[in-house]
Amino acid sequence: MNASPNSLRPNASAATRPPPLGAGIPDRPECPFVELRSIAKSFGPVEAIRNVSLTLRSGRVHTILGENGAGKSTLMKILAGVHEPTRGELLVRGQRVTFANPSESQVAGISIIYQELSLATNLSVAENIFAGHEPRRFGIVDFTSLFRRAQALLDDLGIAIDAGAPVARLSMAQRQLVEIAKGLSRNAELVIMDEPTSSLSDREAEVLFNIVTKLKARGVAIVYISHRMDEIPMTSRSCATASTSVRTTRLRQRSAR
Ligand SMILES: Nc1ncnc2c1ncn2[C@@H]1O[C@H](COP(=O)(O)OP(=O)(O)OP(=O)(O)O)[C@@H](O)[C@H]1O
Ligand SMILES: [Mg+2]
């Protein structure tokens, strides 16, 4: 997998670094990071997706395009451990896995940035970014380290937001960038971005595309979901289209590397 140090986890010393993500799953560089095989998902009578197969490789950007209700978010929530598939197989590094909950997906190295904002507006940017995995000293949240690491992460990503600012004071676009930083605060090997530009200006979208390029160069696999043809990242190598009429996803390869 990605052998180079991933500076998206700033200032993590060897002593404080958590166990490697995907611990327990053997590293098999010859395998794609993730494979979805003939996945289907129904919610009662609603067949959200039918027979979707996708291969997600490290260091590649995979774009999924599809109209509203085509099943894009449902597919990604299966990868994120939110939904269990009704049928089909999920493989991580060639090994069949099932995720009982989102934590198990995170431990396998998968990070999702949801379409819906999930920030706590009464907390600071830093507290939101590291919610659930705050740096601790003697069991107590180490706020100095929390703010320092959050600011370093924002700076590394080129996001000009103060880590100490209350989220309530941020614009919707700024909140979406914080959501992205939150999704990248763990050492993910696959980052899923579900319609990330929906409330971003052109300039903020540019910041996002730079982040995508940076992650790709670091060997991270990226899934970029959109319903806009004009916004397929230039770095995207494969593109899937999801259609409500057939509830299926077809991959077509693009020539860009
Ligand atoms: N939790 C749920 N319970 C019942 N039906 C659901 C649930 N989640 C999604 N669906 C249905 O599954 C289908 C696919 O929805 P999904 O949100 O995955 O589509 P999408 O491609 O992400 O759409 P959008 O572009 O609007 O985000 C829709 O018909 C939706 O109503
Ligand atoms: Mg969606």
Image (cartoon, rainbow, N blue to C red):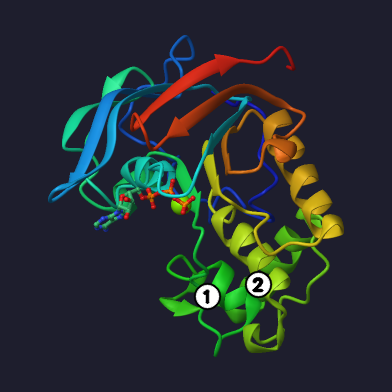
Q: Sequence order check: which comes first, mark 2 or mark 1?
A: 1
Q: Residues within 10 Å of mark 2 (few under 14, many from 20)?
A: many
Percent x, y of residue 80: 37, 46
Residue at the spot 69% in from the left edge and 34% down from the top edge: 232
In the image, 125: left or right of 82? right
Q: Which residue is mark 1?
A: 119
Percent x, y of residue 36: 34, 25
Q: Residue furthest top?
A: 30
Q: Quadrant of the C terminus?
A: top right
The relative height of residue 222 versus residue 171 in the rendered view (above or below) is above
Mark 2 residue type = Arg
**Label number found at residue 175:** 2
Percent x, y of residue 194: 53, 50
Mark 1 residue type = Leu
The relative height of residue 173 versus residue 52 in the rendered view (above or below) is below
Residue at the spot 56% in from the left edge and 77% down from the top edge: 127
- Find numbered disc 1 in the image and state the secondary structure of the residue it sits on: loop
Residue at the spot 36% in from the left edge and 33% down from the top edge: 245
Contact check, label 2 and label 1, Cβ < 8 Å = yes
**Label number found at residue 64:** none
Percent x, y of residue 90: 28, 28
Q: Residue furthest left?
A: 44
Pick the residue in front: 26 or 57.
57
Give how far apart the Cα atoms at labels 2 and 1 are.
Answer: 8 Å
Q: Residues within 10 Å of mark 1 (few under 14, many from 20)?
A: many
